[in-house]
Image (spheres, rainbow, N blue to C red):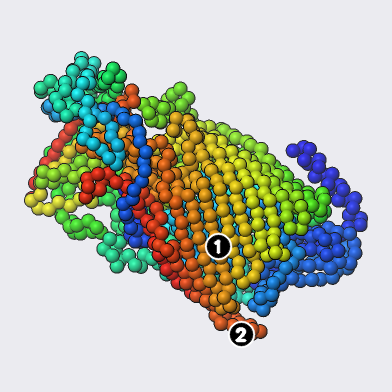
Amino acid sequence: MKRFLILVLLLGAGSAKSMAQDITLSGRITDGATGEELIGANMFVTELKNGTVTNVYGFYSFTMPKGKYRITYSYVGYEDKDTVLNVNQDMTINIELMEESLEFKEALVTGEKVDKNVSENKMSVVSIDVKTVKKIPILLGEVDIIKAIQLLPGVQSAGDGNTLSIVRGGNVDHNLVLLDEAVVYNPSHVVGFFSVFNGDAVKDFELYKGGIPSQYGGRLASVMDIRMKDGNTKKFSASGGIGILSSRLTLEGPIQKEKSSFIISGRRSYFDLFFPLSDMTKDAIANFGDLNMKVNFKLSEKDRLYISAYTGRDRLGFAGIAGFGWGNTTTTARWNHIFNQKLFLNTSIIYSRYNYQIDFNLAKNLNFQRLNYIDDIGIKQDYTYYVNPKNTVRFGFWNTFHTFLPGRIEPITSESIITAASLPKKRALSQAYYVSHEWKPIGRFEMEYGFRVSVFSNAGKGREFVYANGQKNFFQDGSVRPGTVIDTLFYESGKFYNTFANIEPRVNMVYRLNSKSSIKASYNRMAQYLHLIQNIAASTGQEFWTPSTPSIKPQIADQVAIGYFRNFFDNQVEGSVEVYYKNMSNTVELIDNATIDFTENIESQLVAGRGRAYGAEFFLRKTKGKTTGWVAYTLAKSERRADNINRGEWYNFRFDRRHYLTVVASHDLNQRINVSGSFIFATGDAYTAPVGQYTLNGQVIPLYSDRNALRIPAYHRMDLSMTLYRKKVEGKTYKNESSWVFSIYNVYGRRNFYTLDFRVDENTGQNAAYKTYLFRVVPSVTYNFKF
Amino acid sequence: MKKQLYLIGIVFLSLFSACTEKVDLELGETQTRVVIEGYLVTEVDSSYVRLSLTQDYFNPVAPVYIPDGTVEISNDQGTVMFNYVGEGLYKGPAGYIPDTAKVYTLKVVVDGKEYTSTATLYPMFEVDPVLQFDYKPASGFIDEGYAVTYYSVDRREDEIYTRFNFGQNDTMFDQEILFTNADLKKFERVPFELPFYRAQSGDSVMLEFRSLDVPIATYFNALANLNSGAPGPFQTPPANPPTNISGGAVGYFLCADIRRVGQVVP
C-alpha cells in the first residue's frame, strides 16, 4: 500500500512538472436529443493518435501539449462529431452527439474506436446495447437484459426461462447485481421468469465475469453494473409497451430545461386476470410490479446531483389461505463533483432492502405470518484522477452497514395456537477501500492494476453458538448431523466482536499485437461476506441472506484468465477466445437434509467447501451491417468438494455444463422489418437420483446416489421474433414511434426438463421417472410506443 | 416448507400449462444394504423389527427378507429377544408392550455384523376424547362441511415431536403431520382445527397421535422434505434421510406412545 501511494505521488509530481507545457481538456458527452450522459463515449485526438473514454457519468478528461488539434467525439450508434481546437489553456468542452439517422445507418460507419474489442484493456466483460436486447426473442415478449446476457459466453441461465444466472461455474449468489450502485439482492420476478430490470428504464449495463476492477467487490463470480436512465433534459416524452402478461409505461422530461430532469417507469403484470377462468387457479394470486424513479439536477458546471429509486414487489398464493410477498427497494443519492480538469469525484449514499413475508391461514387456530429481510445503508466515494494520458488513478471506499432479520413469526389472530417467535437480528459492517492505476507506458501495452482491502465486522447486539467438540456439524451413520450447542456467547449492542479482512489484488492487461488483434490477461481475487441460503434453484422469495460469522468463513475466489482477441473485415466482426481458471474456497454448501427454515444456528446446516471452475469461451460477433449477431461456445467444468459430502471427493456442481452454445442473429429486411432468432444448446444439469429402494412400514423409500452424480438430457431451444416498425419516409422527422414485436419461444417445441420426479407408475406399479416441461411453443405479441 | 413450495408450484405449473411425461433414464447400480425397520409402540403385540435388503430402483424383484438375524431390545430394566416369525419380521414375546419414559436400545446382528440404535419412548400429550365439529361453507378449494377440532394439554418439558394422522370411516389418510411442541402453548388446554379438512354428517372421524424423539422426527422430517427427484426449481437436493441406526444399515428405530381418538359427526 505504502509503495503504491509513493508511486501515485510520483506520478502526480511528474504530472505537475509537465503541467507547464500541457493543458487538460475535459467535459461531458451527452445525447443531443435527450441530454442523457453517454457512458464509454470516445474522445480521440487525431494528431496524437490517442484519446480517452467517458466514465459512467459521461465525463472525460485528457491532457495534451498545447497546440491545434482535430478532435473526434464518437459513440456507437451516434454520428461522430469532429472539431478543430486551438488549445492553449485548460478547457471544458461539453459535447452533444446525435443518434444516427436512418439513412446514415444504411451506410457502414467505422470510427476510430470500433476496434474496442481488440484495443480496450477489458476482458471477460459482457455487454449488449439496450436496442439490441429489444430485438432478441424473449419468453412472453418481455424485454429482459438478463436473459439477453445469458446468450453470451460464460453466463448461463439457472433453468428454463430463469433469470438467475450462473457465471463461470459460480453459484447464483456469487453475482453482485447493482442498480445505480445499490445492491439488488433478488434480481428476479415470478420465481425467476422475469428480471426486475425494466428495459425502458435502463441506460447501460455491463457484466464483469473476470478481470473485475478494484472498485467492485463482495461477490465471487461477477458484477452486473446497471445504470438507470437519467431522464430527458430537453423535452417531455413517453414510451411503453403492452404485452400479453404485462405492460410498462415510462414518462420522462425536464424539470427545468437543460438543468434538471426526471424519469418514472413502471411495470405491472396482469396474468392473474386469467386465473378465474380455471377452477384450479380461481383463488390463486400471482403478480408483480415495479417502479423506477430518478431525478437529476445540474447544480453547476462542476456539480450534479442524482437521486434514483427502485421498488418492486411479487405476490403469490391462494386467497385467504396462504400468501407470499417479496421485493427489493433501493435508493441512491449521488453527487458528482469536478474538482478540476483532472480530478472527478462521485459520492453516493445508498439504501437497499430485500424482504419477504409469508401469511398462512390454514385454520382459525392455525395461522401465522413470517417476515424476513436484509437492510443496507451505505456510503461510497469514487475518485478518478486523470494524471496524464498514460496514467489514471482511481481510488475510493464503500462502507455499508447490514441488518439481517433471519425470521420472525407472529400469529395473525389471537386464536392461533402459534406463539410469536423471532430469530435475533444480525448486524455487520462491511468496509472496502480500493486503489487502482491505469497505466499506458507504450502504445501497444496497457495495464490496470490495484487492490481492494475489504474488512467485514460482525456487530452486536448479537449472539454466537459454541458447539460440542468445536463441531458445528459432524458425520455419523452415513449422514452429516447438526452439532450440539453447548454454550451461547452474547455480545452487547454496538460492539464489533469478530472481524475478517482480505486484500484482493486485481490486474488487467492488454498487449496489442497489431491493429486487428491483441492478447489480454487478468487476475482477480474476490472475497464474499454475504451468503444466500437457498435449498432450491428457483427464486421464491424464501431464500435468505446471512453474513459471515465466526462459524461461516468468507468465501474467496482467485481467477486468472487469458484471451486472444481478433477483429475481422474492417472491425465488422469481433472474435475472441478466453480461457479461465477459478479456484474457490469456503464455498457455502448445504449438508444433506439441511433444515434452513427458521433455523437460528444456520451454520450447523452448512459446510465450507472448495470449488474449481475452468473453461474456454469462444465468441464471434458481427456488429455492423443489416445482419448482426453472434456465435458463443463455452467448454467448461465446475466442481465442488466438501468434507462429508460424497466422502470428501470432488463432485459436479449442479449447474456444471460441459458444452454451452448460443447463436443469435438479427437481420433488417428493410427499414420497417427486423427478424431475429436465437438458439441454445447446453449439456444437461447434474442431479441426484434414487439408485435403489427399500420399504419401511409399507412406504417405499428411495436410496439416493452421490450428490449430483447423474445428468439429465441436454437442453436446446430456438426462438424467433419479428419486429415491425412504423412506416417512415426518408427525410421526414417523426414525433411518434411505435413497433409490434411478434415472437415465438421454443419454436420446435423441445420438451426440455423443468423438473424431474421419481414415483410409482400407477399402470405398472413400478417406479418410473417423470419430467415436467413448461414451455413448448410460446407465441407472444407486444406493442411498443414512444412519443 | 414443503407445503409452501407445493403451493407455489401449483400456481406456476398451472399458469404455464406444464406437462408431464414418463422418461427413460439410466440410474446406474448401487451396493445392496441391510434395511432395519424397528417399531416399538405402546399397543400390545404391535411392536416388531423387520430385516430386509435394498433393491434396484426401477426393477425390484420380490422382497428379500433376512430370516437369520438376531434382534434384541433392551432398556435399563433388561433385554427382550425378538424372534423371527416370517416375512422378515421379528417379534417380542406374546403380550409385549414397552413402557413410556424409557430409553431403548436395539441391537441387530446380520452375517456377523452388528447394527445398533437408541431411541426414547416419550409419553404422548393428553388429548380430550371428545371432538368439536363446526359447520363451515365452502372456501377456496376446501369443500363445505364440518371442521374438526381436538383439544389437548401438553405437560411435557422436553422437546418432543408428534406424528399425527387422521381419517374417516375406517380409512386413515396418508397425511402424516409432524410437529414439535417447542413452539406450542404448554400446560393449558388448546384447540387444534384439522387443516384443509371437512367431514360430513355421519362420518366417523379418527385421529391418531404418536410421540417421537428428535432423531426419529428428524428422519421423518427429512423424508417428508425429500423430493422424489431433481433437478427442479422447487426441489431440495435429495439425500438419504439421517438414520438413527449405526453400522451402515438404512431404516430407523422408532419408539412411540400412541393415542387414538374417534367420534361420529352428528
| Amino acid at circle 2 | Val
| Labels 1 & 2 near each other (Cβ < 8 A) | no
| Residue A759 drawn above or below residue A77 | above
Q: Nearer the viewer, residue B182 or A535?
A: A535
| Residue position marked by numbered label 2 in the rendering | A729
Q: How many marks?
A: 2
Residue sitting at 25 percent across and 59 percent down? B140
Identify the secondary structure beneath mark 1: strand
Q: Chain for mark 2? A: A
Give the percent coordinates (x, y) of residue A780: 43, 69
Residue A12, image x and y in percent? 83, 48
Q: Nearer the viewer, residue A434 or B31?
A: B31
Left or right position of A703 against A624: left
Q: Position of residue A564 (x, y in %)?
A: 68, 51
Residue A664 disc label: 1
Where does residue A453 sit, x and y in percent of width and height? 66, 40
Q: Nearer the viewer, residue B112 or A196?
A: B112
Secondary structure category for the residue under label 2:
loop
In the picture shown, does residue B143 fall above or below A528? below
- The residue at 15%/55% (across/down) is B145
Closer mark to the observer between disc 1 and disc 2? 1
